[in-house]
Amino acid sequence: MEIVSKAVLVLACIMCVFFLASITSPNKRPRTVQVKIPRARQQQTITEQENISEEDNREKIITTPQRKEPSASNDLDELHLAAIFSEEAVPMAANLAKNAEFVFGAKTFLHLISTDKDCSNIPTSARVFCELTEEDFSSREPHKNGEIIYGKKAYLEVVRRKNVIFKSFLQKHNAAVFVDVDVVFLQDPYGKIGTDKHSLLQFSYNYDQKPGCNKDGQPFNNDANTGLWFARNTAEVLDFFDMATRLIAKGYDKTDQGGVWAALRESDISSKVSMLNCEMYQSGLYFFNKRCLDCDVVAVHANFIISSKVKVGCFKAAGLWFNESKGNKQFVLNKEFRVAKDKLLIKQCT
């Protein structure tokens, strides 16, 4: 019996030695603990992990945060608009600048891009910027008498390079709205454009004559107007800009818009294109003829008017000319103005 007791005692001592060795061995790795880290703290935690000393061999399982693609303008911290102007278009560019001051909120910014590297006559502010293009227009022939005429050589020299300039601008932002300087806003466009999360591109209508054009997200047709459109900064969209530039010669009018139409026909992006509500984003044909003045208008584009001087007259008649000092007064849309009956090429506004 004494021998058995001693054997049991020896066995117990051996087990105790092995147990102590197992918990003190430097080669034994501790149990891994999975730590769930809130998304907002992930980047900070990764930085903290880099500072952990070699002696502290605690492990954390970190998931690298993925880049979130913008899905709607409400998801964008800011909305940036870009417009290109030449020397002859300074009055309208200045009008758009002052218009932005009246209408845009804190999250909306206008960038006016000069082809003639001159911003001296453009009023700028915390929401309005004037920038110089890197494109060389030094050989461009000026418009005669300072009047911009659609389709003339001086006009074409500028618009054929719009897609190159706009692509460069888009690369600096998550998304952008591209407008002509003959556009006026009645409301802040932030949260009212780019809200279709499935659309990489959104266009205003050209004619506003399509059935259902007062509904967002209508299927694309050959009525996309590049005087006011929205684009997201994705590789597919940037490639689209390149294609639109290459295909200008195939376009119906050899301009930036013709190149865009040709690219929409030949690319695979059409399923990711939608149209803007035509009552909210009105063309010159719609606004100055049909005059849906009680619609919830966000913007008016004075297209279908050949002469820049006539465009100015139409804006003045409608109460949309901001380029004359109004102090701190808010603009009032003139719902009593009359227009010529020529529906395609408006000759005058009274």
Image (cartoon, rainbow, N blue to C red):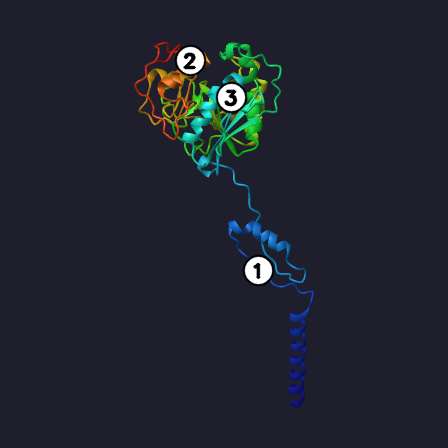
Say if 190 sits above or below 316 in the image. below
Identify the secondary structure beneath mark 3. helix
In space, the residues marked 2 and 1 are separated at their CA atoms by: 73 Å
Q: Which residue is mark 3?
A: 264
State which quadrant residue 186 falls in. top left
Q: Is residue 4 left or right of residue 95?
A: right
Packing grade of label 2 (10 A; few <14, some 14-19, many >=20) is some
Identify the secondary structure beneath mark 1. loop
Give amino acid for label 3.
Answer: Leu
Nearer to us of marks 3 and 2 is: 2
**Disc on the earlier residue, 3 or 2:** 3
Identify the secondary structure beneath mark 2. helix
Q: Is residue 348 left or right of residue 123?
A: left
Q: Which residue is mark 2?
A: 310
Cβ atoms under marks 3 and 2 closer than 8 Å? no
Could you say where residue 85 lies in the image, as x and y percent from the top left?
52, 21
Instruction: Say which of 266 and 222 sits in front.
Output: 222
In space, the residues marked 3 and 1 are separated at their CA atoms by: 53 Å
Specify the label residue 33 is tagged with.
1
Instruction: Say which of 267 and 131 sits in front.
Output: 131
Give amino acid for label 2.
Answer: Val
Packing grade of label 3 (10 A; few <14, some 14-19, many >=20) is many
Give the farthest residue toward the bottom.
Answer: 2
Counting every numbered tag in the picture gives: 3
